[in-house]
Amino acid sequence: MPQHSTIPLMRAWNSWSNRPAEMVFLPLGIRITPILYSTRSKMTSAIEPRRDTVRLGRHTIDGSLIELEANHSGTTVAFSTTKTDPFAVRGSWDGKVLAEWGLRFWLTLAISSDGGEIAIHDAGKNVTLVKIGTRFVAVATAEAPVHVTGHDTIEALRADFEENGYFYTATRKNEAPVIALRFNLEMMRRGAYAAGVADSAELAIAKAQACLAAGAPADVSDAQAGLFEGALDAMRDVVAWNTIWDETNARPYTAVTRIWNLGKFAVWFNDQIFAALLAGVFDADLARENMATAMAGATPQGNIACIVTSNDAWVDRTQLPFGALVVWQLYQRTGERSMIQASYDALVRNRRWWQENRDPDGFGLLSCGTSDVGEGLYKGTAFAARNETGMDNSATHDEAVYDPVTRTLSTFDLGLNCAAALDAEMLSKMAAVIGKHDDASEFAALAERSRTLISETLWDESRGIFANRQRGGGFVRSLSPTSFYPLLCGAAAPAQAARLLEHLSDASTFGGDYVLPNATRDDPAFADNVYWRGRIWPNVNYMVWLGLRRYGFIAEASKLARQSYDLFMQSWRKDRVASENYNAVTGEAMDQGDTDPFYIWAAMLPLMATGEIVEFDPWKGWSVRNTGQDVTLGPMLSPSGALRLTVEAGNLVMTLNERATLKTDLRTTLSHITISEGRFACTIAPISGSGYIELPGVTVQSIFVARLDGKDAGFVASGEGIRITVAESARDRQLEVSFSPRDPLAMQGIA
């Protein structure tokens, strides 16, 4: 029967299950599942990363290209799938390395449907057909299979191989809930199949055969080349591979990782919003789906649950309130008010809950805790309270004592309070956009009060750094990179910020080749190299990078982005590993067991690299930067459509929806970019030499106003539009151009 018909059509065929080589057409619940069998080991494999050796390759968000390699009993098979249209998919395999005679290594395509409909194989046409509701799915192969068998389930197929071996004919069938098309790697070391969906059997067969005959389409071009090569590609692949179907809740979402076995689904609040942030670089629908999944953890008490899985729900605690930051960034990237409206109420309730439940002395600063609700694992313990920071075993908690009366830890947590201050600030911005002016004032005041308390209470003058502090006493000894979070929320006074930079570069604490360690290098906890005791965490690096940018520490932010990119690429290029955390001495990803090799927030390391070129900054909005280094980048989302950017020989060109929109040779950053019908505006950062900004598609005759810092800006006609000369300057300047579009598609390609 039909399954999930509301999934966006371009993503309908995709790698939705925990078997990454399995292609699923979600609207009908049809599955094409490769099964490997080795006579050598007498074992089958459904190619599951939790059990098998799988190298996840390129993966576009819409599933138009999916590549991976699987190793089973020493034999390596490469798989690739492509699409010719939303209703057709083409797959291929290539036996790269054979560890046994190919005749005895079998690759089987198992065709089945979630509704249990009967699949029928027509040997004469070499086609397998399934009717689901009123629709038909046809699967055709380039060569006829050696052997066709029928089974009730995939598990029965695997049992047939493992019990009866590679050459057994008693299960031959042409009609069954699971039709198994069997190939071996001696006769078909390389092979291909295609599937087509249509409203008649004939049309489905024709679509499948046409897709198969068309061959593989042209290769997908690199998303990022030149400066920070491969950063955007890696982000795309990590997001796409971790995007799966949650059968329990009937929803798509980007999991923390498709590899962990934490039940049928698992959602951490922070991990899920970061998944939304990363997905939003490419696909607004997927970003919305991930935010909706995160907001589904909202409790009747007001907080958003720390974690919800098919096995447990930690409703007694939450995680750092970064939700409003992510929603604000998604709003800036997409320009869609719906991004704010969908999450606003839940985020407001969550922020008010913090003040009501985690400030036992009414002082204004927060402590982590665990409320007396729910039945979550560890409820009512110090460990549960530490979960609210996400930094579960951090040495910054070593001196914290759990108070069962207030149900909180004894310390003011620096990272928590900075996140809460930032959350209030972002909520104020969001409230203003959707017209909730009383809320905007409330949260602006709360943010300011929080910043003041952080600056005055959590600054340790003797060490010249921010730190956790006992509610009734002194500072804790151990530090983490949350010491830099006051930059993120705007709490650091100028003198405090300057001293923070000294710690950032100090090789005995946070500096070094591999940064940022989540315990200072001179802390005994650093040597533990276990989880938050000394290792590098991508989400923390990202927050520190944002804070450095907020305070205008551009060189320091760029250095951190470069080091984070290099750290990520060290494991990515070699092993396609996107690690949950990294060794702070060697940069290794998988040197100890408490890390996952394909974790969603690992992509926040290359996100910083792309943000050095194109960013949607929480305070400066849409920004592009020309360093003079060659780069190609895109496509990615922008408020005006699909964005691509190139820099060649120092000349930057930005296209929107395949139309050139902006050209410049200025070696600087353009921020607060606004592009709409009849208007272009931006802030030009200081530049050391003169240059130009060119607006293709805008004619001299169409200009109403062109002003630079409120004064008329000179402009001339260029080959494709107008060119404005910009002189050198040591300060920011505002450029605004108003014009009459010569056609509805002028500038950004949208009305």
Image (spheres, rainbow, N blue to C red):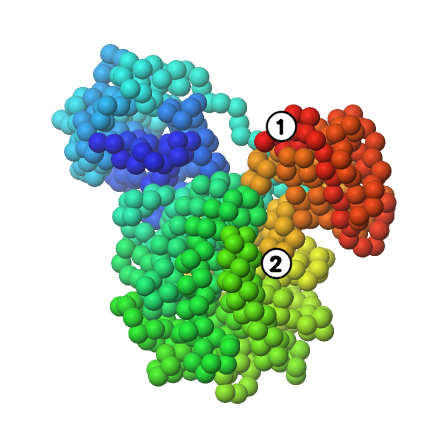
Q: Residue at x 67, y 35 (%)?
A: 678
Question: What residue is pinned by disc 2?
Answer: 546
- The quarter of the displayed image where residue 663 is located: top right
Q: Is residue 491 above or below residue 473?
A: above
Seen as rendered, the residue at the extreme bottom is 473
Q: Residue at x 85, y 48 (%)?
A: 728
Foreground residue, 77 or 132?
132
Going from N to C along the chain, the mark reached first, 2 or 1, is: 2
Tell whether 252 sits left or right of 577: left
Residue 442, image x, y percentages: 52, 67
Which element type, helix, strand or loop, lies under badge 2? helix
Question: What residue is pinned by disc 1?
Answer: 745
Q: Amino acid at mark 1?
A: Leu
Foreground residue, 174 or 473?
473
Q: Is residue 379 above or below residue 718?
A: below
Mark 2 vs mark 1, foreground winner is 1
Q: Dot 2 surroundings within 10 Å: few (below 14), some, or many (20 or more)?
A: many
- The quarter of the displayed image where residue 682 is located: top right
Regarding residue 648, the answer to whether it shows in the image is no
Which element type, helix, strand or loop, lies under badge 1? loop
Regarding residue 462, the answer to whether it shows in the image is yes
